[in-house]
Amino acid sequence: MSAATSKVINFRAPAAKQALIDHAVEVSGMNRTEFILDAVCDKAREVLADQTRFALSRQALQRFNAQLDAPLEDNAAIRRLLSTPAPWER
């Protein structure tokens, strides 16, 4: 990332948490910025993936429902997936 496209994020941390982070940074072989940025981005992706409520316009909702209701195309990969027992059923 170039300096022109990056922005500074400053925050305070209790000494104990900073020591924990610094220890993990040392073990990981990354620098503190890389470590914290990777950890925060992982958490951000997790939070966004867990979203269960989405706002759609009426028209977008109708298109979404139409796609859900449409029959599946004949697809060998889908047939194989649907005919394979789940791991807990084996």
Image (cartoon, helix red, strand yellow):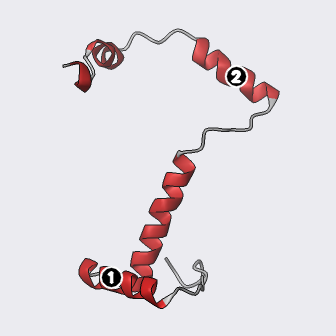
Which residue is pictured at 73% across the width and 26% down the height?
61
Image quadrant in which you'd find residue 21: bottom left
Secondary element at image label 1: helix
At label 2, counting other C-alpha atoms closer than 10 Å, the crowd grade (few under 14, some 14-19, many 20 or more) is: few
* Dot 2 amino acid type: Arg
Q: Which mark is residue 63?
A: 2
Task: Name the kind of residue labelled 1 in the image.
Answer: Val
- Apparent side of residue 8 relative to residue 32 in the rendered image (left or right): right
Q: Label 2, label 1: how many angstroms apart (C-alpha)? A: 47 Å
Q: Residue at x 57, y 79 (%)?
A: 6
Percent position of residue 15, x then y? 47, 91
The image quadrant of residue 56 is top right
Q: Give the structural element (helix, strand or loop) at label 2.
A: helix
Above or below residue 12? Residue 58 is above
Residue 30 or residue 90, whichever sits in front: 90
Q: Quadrant of the C terminus?
A: top left
User: In this rendering, would 3 be left or right of 36?
Assistant: right
Residue with the mark numbered 1: 25
Residue sticking out furthest to the bottom: 15
1 over 54 or under it: above or below: below
In percent of width and height, residue 87 lies at 23, 26
